[in-house]
Amino acid sequence: MQNNECIYISEQFTKYQDNSLSSEIRARIDAHLTVCSPCHQLYQDLNKMLDQLHKLPPVSSNQDFTSNLLHHIKAINQEPFWYKIYASSYTRIAGSAIAAGLIVALGMNIWIDPISPRSPQGQRNFSGEQKAQTHPTEAITSQLDSLQGSGADTLELNNSTINSKGSSLQLVSGTK
Amino acid sequence: MTDKKTDEQLIAEFQGGQEQAFVKLVDRYKDRLINFVYRFLNDMTDAEDLVQETFLKVYKNKHAYREIAKFSTWIYTIAGNLARSELRKRKRRKTFTMSQLSFDDNEFTPVDPGKDTEGIVFNTYAGEEIMKAIKELAEPFKTIIILRDIQELSYEDISTILDIPMGTVKSRVNRARLKLQETLSYLRE
């Protein structure tokens, strides 16, 4: 490319080859190609290249192409109805959405309150009754306080069980 | 006897339940589509697989076709989308590099095996050179060159297949040809 005119001319080559330019522009290109040897060379090279493109050796399908395809289609048609539903893209999308929803719900549940009971006052059981809950350490402290009040100086918790949130701790022996 | 039914008549028959019409469409388009996809992927096995997938999509979604577009542009759009998607997958996997795939791996069927040997050698050599240059092109240029200069589709059909205005098709064809010429010169040096 030598100047802006060369760039303009090269941009018109396809339309020039298709014969879809106005006579004025066509004449302008003709005139340019006679005086500008790089553009003339480029135009000739483009024509040769197009000729090569048109002569590209075609490739053909395998002889078994159609029979393989029909065999594949037959196999699809024989798939059971439930499998078609399972394999359909709509089912996959719906399944993924449900799975994502469950993961989010589970994640939020853990994130909001992973361990402690929701209400410090206690939990409701299935019948709606409110169970009074006392923290195990509070129970022991209150027992110790009562012992101290009575003048005793030892507390035996042999074979006692402390229950807390579904887990239990059995004390075999313990003294204060 | 030649079947003079148009593609649109055949797909209408297939939509009406005549499976034989589908087979006729397969016979009409399989080679054209394989040539189209093969120029994209440079791999005959992958090209056949992808064209099989294209026809399966047509089979499964036959009712998605409406006679507002030509059947040819519809099926080329499906094949083109699959080919582009395959190219993107290859790029992601980084298994498709210019240096890895030698042209020795590609199979070329000469246009006319009856031609003299010199002609075949020239054709194959020129074909390899051009294919190598096409492979170097950016995807939009590659697509347009394959559709226009190898498949020889009309500007109007290309505009429908690529969903771009006709003016853009024409200017892109011009730029793609110049780019291809530049790449060929570079490869010949």
Image (cartoon, coloured by chain):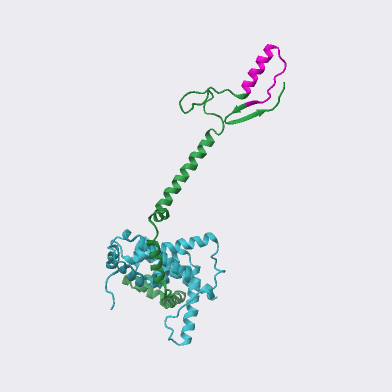
Chain colours: A green, B cyan
- Residue at 34% in and 72% down: B28
User: Does A69 sit above or below residue A81?
Assistant: below
Nearest the viewer among A81 and A70 is: A81
Any part of residue A133 in sight: yes
Residue A64, image quadrant? bottom left
Task: Write down the region rendered in magenta.
Answer: A137-161
The image shows residue B173 at horizontal and vertical percentages of 40, 67
- Residue at 51% in and 62% down: B90
Magenta run includes residue A143: yes
Any part of residue B167 in sight: no
The image shows residue A11 at horizontal and vertical percentages of 41, 68
Question: Quadrant where the C terminus of chain B lies?
Answer: bottom right
Nearest the viewer among B40 and A5 is: B40
Residue A10, image quadrant? bottom left
Nearest the viewer among B85 and B52 is: B52
Question: Quadrant where the N terminus of chain B lies?
Answer: bottom left
User: Does B27 sit above or below residue A133?
Assistant: below
The image shows residue A98 at horizontal and vertical percentages of 44, 45
